[in-house]
Image (cartoon, grey):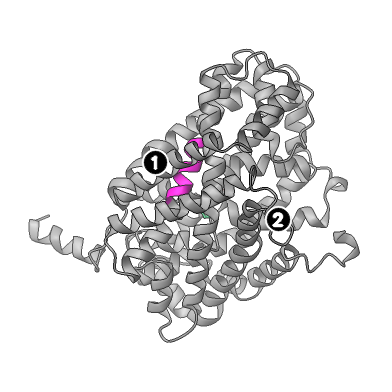
Amino acid sequence: MSEMDQRKNAVAQSPTNRDSFGSKLGVIAAAAGSAIGLGNIWKFPYMTGENGGAAFVLVYLVCIAIIGLPVMLSEFIIGRRGQKNAIGSFKKLAPGTPWFLTGWMGVVAAFMILSFYAVVAGWCMEYVFKSVTGGFAGLSPEEIGNVFGTFTSGVVRPIFWLTVFMALTGCIVYAGIKEGIEKYSKILMPLLLVIIIVLGIRAVTLPGAGAGLEFLFKPDFSKLSAKGVLLALGHAFFSLSLGMGTMITYGSYINKRENLGATTLQVTIADTAIALLAGIAIFPAVFAFNIDPASSVGLAFITLPNVFNQMPGGMFFGFLFFLLLSVAALTSAISILEVVVAYFSEELKMTRHKATWIATTVITIIGVFCSLSLGPMSEVLFFGRNFFGVMEWTSSNLLLPLGGLFITLFIGWYWGPKRTKEELSNEGTLAVPYLSLFMFVCKYIAPLAIFIVFLHGMGWLSWLPFLK
Ligand code: PHE
């Protein structure tokens, strides 16, 4: 190819001269990096533990298929077509309409989610440090519980780790899409995969591991409640990073020749596989040592250090596990920060560097309040919740579902099949056999299902006898 052709090609790929992902693998690594996070390795296992195991897993898989796939694909379409941040893309595709408010909600959700997410990510880093320095050695289960309580309700250490985590996130985003997000995702995601496989092998080769696998894979539907089903749906959103414009923003960096349908499928499969692998790395070990799997938020931070204490080579595997959590959290955090940075730089016309510093600093400050609300400020309640709880509850139950609802309605009712086909077929060069099914799901199924999750999340369905 002559130099002239190469230049022409480059212009065709990025008409606006924006930074973008450089390769197919880079797109997958970055988008899977966003999806795979604390949601998969920390939240999914404890939700499974609390909601009866395999039956919950099965329902979760169905939710991923009927809600996760269409919402992610819709976000990619909006982003790649709009070639802008979450708000700018809506403004470009639907000028003069209020649809851009969907993107606006996403930016607000990004501030809220990252502020508490980074607090938990900071805990993971503290635990990496503790595992290396033998901080759990010889402690009884009760003492390990106390370590967690004292640490998270403290002031200096959790805020220190929160700041370190946000600084790392900020540095990667600061470096840009290709040189920052893509480059680091391509290093960190393979590392994550290797660690989780090593941990899985360790867990399933423990004597008595079978009971854990059975818990994860042999469904007992009598243990599943209607509430569990709705939780699974809500979690599908969080786990796939949907509803807040993350995939709109990342979609805007995907080149016009990539197959969006295939990318969506690959990212979704990767996210689901890692959630299941996390279950395989955790439950066999928990059962092998006769520990109750339903230990809620403390599963990773109290139950597991306890398990590692009893396991041969446990100190090393404990270190690996918390490193895994930290890495997973980092690639998700960069995608959340990017939503804000892309908005600040494109809509508010800041330089990328200034946008990154401002966003990182503001989110860290909100994060400090999240962290303090678990300790010295735990008495300050809003509607019965501490500040951490408010950030988590509002984003997961209100903003993400509403965002997802409007995103599917936008594609189903506003954007329509003709323009959707143009984008999915790369202007007619790819076949889109799933188009009518996708449009049908976006018009009716997904909005209805998401609306029900939203009503449940708001607590407005609690009068139903089977949801008590
Ligand atoms: N998907 C991430 C996780 O599973 C969290 C996340 C939510 C990231 C929303 C971006 C947007 O941990």
Q: Could you give the CA–CA distance between mark 1 and mark 2, rounded to whole angstroms?
A: 30 Å
Label 1 sits on residue: 168
Q: Quadrant of the C terminus?
A: bottom right
Q: Position of residue 172 (x, y in %)?
A: 35, 45
Q: Nearer the viewer, mark 1 or mark 2?
A: 2
Residue on which disc 2 sits = 385
**Is 418 or 303 nearer to us in this picture?**
303
Of residues 411 and 394, the one drawn nearer to the viewer in this rendering: 394
Q: Position of residue 325 (x, y in %)?
A: 54, 36
Total residue callouts: 2
In the rendered image, residue 400, in percent from the top left (x then y), is placed at 59, 63
- Residue type marked 1: Leu
Amino acid type at circle 2 is Arg
Q: Is residue 417 magenta?
A: no
Q: Which residues are magenta?
A: 325-334
Q: Residue at x 75, y 42 (%)?
A: 54
Q: Main secondary structure of the magenta part?
A: helix
**Which residue is at the far bottom?**
96
Q: Is residue 326 highlighted in magenta?
A: yes
Q: Quadrant of residue 212?
A: top right
